[in-house]
Amino acid sequence: MKKLMKGNEAIAEAAIQAGCRFFFGYPITPQNQIPEYMSKRMPEVGGCFLQSESEVAAINMVYGAGGAGARVMTSSSSPGISLKQEGISYIVGAEVPCVIVNMVRGGPGLGSIQPAQSDYYQSTRGGGHGDYRMCVLAPSSVQEAVDLTQEAFDIADRYRNPVMVLGDGLIGQMMEPVDMDLCKDRKPAEDLTEKTWAATGHVPTEEAPRAIINSLYIQPDVLEKHCQKLQAKYDAIEAAECRWQEEETEDAEIVIVAYGTTSRICRSAMRKLRQEGIRVGMIRPITLWPFPEAAIRSTLKTARQYLCVEMSMGQMIDDVRLAVNGERPVDFYGRTGGMVPTVTEIVDKVKAMYDNDDLHKAEKAFNDTVGAVGNAFNKLGQKIEKAVNNPELEQKAENFRKQASDVANRAASGLAKGMDAMASTLGKAFSSIFGGAQPEEPKSTETVDTPAENNEGGEQ
Amino acid sequence: MATVFKKTSMLTDKPFHYCPGCTHGIIHRLTAEVLEELGIGETAIGVAPVGCAVFAYDYFNCDMMEAAHGRAPAVATGIKRVHPDKAVFTYQGDGDLASIGAAEIVHAATRGEKITVIFVNNAIYGMTGGQMAPTTLPGQVTTTSPYGRDTNHCGFPVHVSEMLATLNGPAYIERVSVHDVAHVKKAKAAIKKAFQLQMEGKGFTLIEVISSCPTNWGKTPKEALEWVKSDMIPNYPLGVYKDITAGGDQ
């Protein structure tokens, strides 16, 4: 049964249903409903909620509990996540699974408490010190936040690596219907095995020797090997855990790349633009790392341009550019500081991109020119009519008719050929029809016969 | 032949890396012996600090986690909440605990976190080469107080045991020394009491052990032990600062 739930609370309940029994956190807006919900629910399920003295302490408590073998979570928002970076680096280094929720707000510094996507670099590039990666899941609805939070625990356990659920103030604060029955008492994924590596205070056995949870490798050659081992893990995550959603990309000429809240606004813009005949599609990365590079590259066959929309000054655009690798232009539209882009803003941006495209510029010029040629024929027809009505000029008119018919035939044939040629090279077609005249300027009636003449040249 | 002495099973066979005359070795051994004697060692979980004892996970023969600088009490909190029936301890130096980790130790103490903290105070940052610590004595020369600690410029030493004893969360806090046999025996008794109270669920326990650092103090091992007696102990008086079992304390 569907239930109306606030994003933050839905995430908290989803975590509990996925077996999370330990939560350590510190208050910060706009994620406070997560610790508040946990403080009420954890005692009911025999778990532990503890409000820490700082974000720094919270992430280290997470490290301790995760290292001790438990499913554990913390949540915070941007400034608080910055404070956790030291701990996250240690957690990755020591290979401890845990889930970290970031309900992103505007930055830098204390910034604002409104939704933002300006922590993209921090979450996908490591954030803390050292060579590391962390799987980053970016939900765009409350239901998806529920599903991804639960998956996050499996991914974390599978690779012994922290997983971040990256929402924003909107995802956390808005209420949407969610099917909580689907997530109830979710069992860990079947491929997950017992955490024999954990520091559980166990008598050592052959299968589970004395646990040392540690990120210190004082010998450089040993640390390098450790980093290579971690890298192999990141490679495995890239190969297996990349998630994205494609919408109307099959014929898309302009592909929007957007995640989370922004993707919902882009979806509305996309529908509006489609109604106006502009072929727009969207790729919505669900994992920000690993980034769906292959999915973006697969749209290169139809895409002429890309637009990255973010609630930041442009961070994910770097990954889009890396994916496109210079083969197409990548444009950006963003609002930041807690401002949310509107559908109209995105529609206008896409239209401007569409109009600026050389193809559409040429199309417009072509249509203008065809119109001008038609106009010229119209005037010519009027002249012919006059000639026919003057018996003295009958002979002249006959010649003129022939000439005009010839011109018309040649022009028509030239236009047809030109259209064919345009499929490969528009410029060439123009030059073949109009003798290299600037397509922006419609031809005057006086030069009406020149296309036919020049067309011969073009046929050679 | 009857065995009159045996090395504790709670220490691994790995040789200590500590400098000659450093008393970390004694404090390791006392802690390990207590864990063994109380029968809680095999299932204990320890947290190593950043500092000279950073490799403690190589020496204590139980499950160990290495913490970031100062964060051991937070890490131990996470562990203890998952395994409330296990002995959980941190082993921290004065830079780690009293400076960068001041918030973590205060809040673990005030929460009454049921862990035991072995706090080794040698008034200096040993691992990084002898810089001024929060516990460095007034006038003491270090590599970052070359003219001696000027209290007008950089303040006074932190008295951790006294400070934490003002809180309601701690069950037992004692400051001990290991500069001679009598004090070593007293130190062991204190560590034992701390672990016992932890296992009884009484609350937070901390034993501050005054330790020597001949290398960074620029003294011979013998001189260093004498300096503990002549300079450290007068600044850091030994004794029980908090004992909820003593009656009348709370």
Image: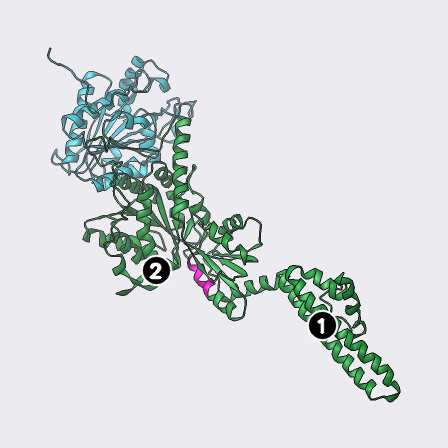
Chain colours: A green, B cyan
> Which residues fall within the magenta stretch?
A260-267
Q: How far is the residue under mark 2 from the one under mark 1? A: 59 Å
In the displayed structure image, the side of residue B208 where residue A308 appears, left or right: right
| Closest to the observer, B174 or B13 | B13
| Closest to the observer, A69 or B239 | A69
Q: Is mark 1 on a helix, strand or loop?
A: helix
Residue type for callout 1:
Ala
In the displayed structure image, the side of residue A131 where residue A318 appears, left or right: right
Mark 1 Cα shell of 10 Å, populated few (<14), some (14-19), many (≥20): few
In the displayed structure image, the side of residue B198 where residue A5 appears, left or right: right
Any part of residue B152 in sight = no
Instruction: Indicate the quadrant where residue A36 lies.
Output: bottom left
Q: Residue at x 34, y 39 (%)?
A: A91
Residue A271's place in the image compared with B90, above or below, is below
Q: What residue would you read off at disc 2?
A: A142
Q: What residue would you read off at disc 1?
A: A412
> What percent of the width, then of the height, locates residue A268?
46, 66
Sequence-earlier tag: 2 or 1: 2
Which-is-in-front pick, marks 2 and 1? 1
Residue A13: image tag = none
Instruction: Indicate the quadrant where residue B2 lies.
Output: top left
Count of numbered marks: 2
Q: Which residue is drawn at 32% across and 61% down?
A: A6
Which chain letter matches label 2? A
> What percent of the width, then of the height, locates residue A391?
86, 89
Badges 2 and 1, same chain: yes
